[in-house]
Every structure is written in structure tokens, then in C-alpha cells.
Amino acid sequence: MNETPPRVRAEIDLAAVRGNVRALRERAPRSELMAVVKADAYGHGAVPCARAALRAGATWLGTATPQEALALRAAGITTRTLCWLWTPGGPWREAIEADVDVAVSGMWALDEVLAAARASGRTARVQLKADTGLGRNGCQPADWPELVQAALAAQSEGAIKVTGLWSHFACADEPGHPSIAAQLALFRDMVGYAEKEGLEPEVRHIANSPATLTLPDSHFDLVRTGLAVYGVSPAPELGTSAQLGLRPAMSLKASVALVKGVPAGHGVSYGHHYVTGHETNLALIPAGYADGIPRHASGRGPVLVGGKVRTAAGRVAMDQFVVDLGADTVRTGDEAVLFGPGDAGEPTAEDWARAAGTIAYEIVTRIGPRVPRVYLNEDPGSEATS
Ligand SMILES: *Cc1c(COP(=O)(O)O)cnc(C)c1O
């Protein structure tokens, strides 16, 4: 191992990922669990997190792009994988040949899947996606009969097998929102129509993390959990990670790059939006927006350094920002914790989300490629596996 402490690093606790998957399976005991590992597992590292989730009982993986699904296959992961964000051109054939289940939201996609399946001589596994109200991807109810009938015809030809029927919520993070019941009712109708016409999907699914945590009626055959696998609460209104039985897997840490005394009235960082009120000590934190630290958290982002939570003084720059230690001091090379599980006094990703006016999803997912990921607790040892 390289003994040089990195400038900044994201420690990923794989025991937390495994524990979160087990906790989520207990919440949805009759459903299979898909670990959503899109966007490099929300910044945590797709391959190590996928392996950890599978060890803890996940039976499916989910990705947005086909490249993400193919990268799992290239790493030797053969678990059932659904990939849902397609654009014309695919690559459908590569996905079919890699045994990836492909999502289809409209006729254009079904046509391209059919052509690729015929060319490869393989049966494509297709999951039809219904737009039950999100208004994003998925097939509108008015267009559903045409898509279902075309899928039935393709299935009887042997080109495809419809393995799933699914949808996605708009407001699952706002329990009681009227759209939730409306989407569930429409989902049941659209699934009912497809099954009456003769489709026999292996899995019907609509629940993301917040629905998995709050809405047992939405679990169906499979739940698609992303953020909760990484231990972060999907919304402050749903409770903290601890209240939800989850543990944040990512801790973002930096080595203090410089400590210095400055006089009163000294401007700090670009634009001088912070000016020291008195003689004080400043510490330089060597992480900035190029690393995914939101510039919107300028003047607000919290950091545990020298035993106290301090606040970013002035602008977050591309590579660094500054905290005002007041009368305290720390040493160059001391550890600064930007966020972590929160139980050692450090801020959480939710705290950074509040400071930046965004959601915790964005905080962890945008931690950039310049930040090395360091994996902890890779070996489950004697931990229960299911
Ligand atoms: C990202 C995503 C999920 C996972 O959402 P979480 O709220 O992170 O659990 C599930 N399904 C689809 C279609 C998604 O895009």
C-alpha cells in the first residue's frame, strides 16, 4: 500500500453497503432487491459496490446507460442487470449478447431491439416501462396497447422475451403525495392489461429507495434501491440514515494543506466574500469544485477539523477552500472530514446538501474522478450473508 496520505480521498465502507442491503431486504422481505449502481454507484464505485451488494443478497443490478451495464460484465459480474437509458443506436446488440435486460419505453426502441436480436440470433430480454405519471421516460397509457401488442408479436417470433413490466415514481420521497396512489393504481391497470393480453413477466417493479422504505404496497416482485444502498437518506422528511436503519458508506476526507495566522481585516478567497474579524488562524482544505465540492456551499459548507465543525470561509474554489479556526490551531497534514456517517461529530452528505441548496444524491454522486476511492471492509469475514 502507498503510505502517502492522498490530498483528498473518499473512503467507502463496504460493510456499510452490505448492512444497508440487508436492512433493505428486511423492509421488502417478499421482493427481490436490485442494487442500482448507475453513475459509478452514485460516486461510490460500481464494481466494488455491486459485489458487496450481491454478497448481502441483492439479486439484480440496475444501470442507466448501456456502457455502465457492459462495464459490470467486463468486470466478470454476470448477475441479472437491467439497463434503462437508451438512445437510438444502442448499443443493443452488445447488451443482448452480454445478457443485459434492456428497458423499452417506446416503439422506436422495440424496433431497434428487434433488429439487433434478429442480427445476433439471440432472444433479447426486454422490460417494458410504463409512464404512470412521472412524465419522464416510459410509455404513455394511450400508447401502451400498441407497445404491448408489438412486444407480444416479437415474443411469438422468438426475438424477445418480456421479462419485466415496470415504472418509476415522481414523488415517493413525499409520503402521502396524491400522485403516489394514482401512479400505483395506473401501474396495476397497465400491468393488468399486458398480462391479460398474454405477457408473463418475471418481475413487476416500481419502488425506488423512498418507496422501499415507506410504501410496502409498492414493492411488487422487486425493489430498485439506489441511494439507500449507500446509506444516505433519500429525503430529510423520511428521517436520518440512522432512523432508517442505514449507514452512510462514503466518508470524504482531506489533509490540511496549510495553516497560518493572519491579521484582522484579511480577505479570504476569490471575491473577498469573507473578511477576518480579528487576528485568526486559517486552514487550507485542498478540495474544491473540481473534486465535486459544490461552489454553492461557499460560506456555508461544514468541515470537521481540529475537533470542531467549521464552515467554509468565503468561496469554494476549483481545488481548495479555507476555514477560519479562530483562536484554535491544527497542524499541516491533520485530517479534515467533510462528511461521513456523522457519528464522530463530522458533518453528513445531507448537511452539505442543505448548505448547497441541493439533495444528498447530488453531493455523493458528484464527487469527482480526481478523488481516489479507498475501500474499507472489503472482506465480509464472518458477517451473515443473508
Ligand atoms: C436512479 C433510479 C432508481 C434508484 O433511485 P433511488 O431513489 O436512488 O433508490 C430506480 N429506478 C430508476 C429508473 C432510476 O433512474
Image (cartoon, rainbow, N blue to C red):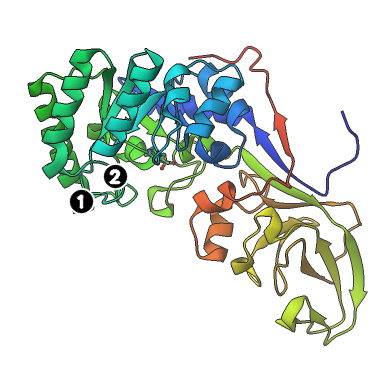
Percent x, y for residue 271?
Answer: 73, 82
Quarter of image, res 272: bottom right
State the residue at coordinates (15%, 37%): 144
* Residue type (three-letter) at the residue carrying disc 1: Ser
Q: Which residue in the structure is indicated by mark 1? A: 179
Percent x, y for residue 42?
Answer: 55, 41
Quick one: label 2, few (<14), some, or many (20+) residues within 10 Å? Answer: many
| Vertical relation: 287 (above or below) 30 | below
Q: Nearer the viewer, residue 375 or 24?
A: 375
Left or right position of 213 against 152: right
Left or right position of 347 against 1: left
Q: Nearer the viewer, residue 252 or 308?
A: 252
State the residue at coordinates (51%, 15%): 78
Beta carbon of the mark 1 residue lies under 8 A of ligand 1: no
Q: Are marks 1 and 2 in contact (CB under 8 Å)?
A: yes
Left or right position of 345 against 2: left
Camera sees residue 247: no
Q: What secondary structure is marked by label 2? A: loop
Answer with the quadrant where ligand 1 appears in the image: top left
* Residue type (three-letter) at the residue carrying disc 2: Phe
Give the Cα distance between marks 1 and 2: 8 Å
Quarter of image, res 159: top left
Quarter of image, res 148: top left
Specify the label residue 319 is tagged with. none
Camera sees residue 149: yes
Quick one: label 1, few (<14), some, or many (20+) residues within 10 Å? Answer: some
| Vertical relation: 65 (above or below) 301 | above
Percent x, y for residue 72?
Answer: 56, 24
Percent x, y for residue 82?
Answer: 40, 27
Comes first in the chain, label 1 or label 2: 2
Quarter of the image where the N terminus is located: top right
Specify the label residue 169 is tagged with. 2
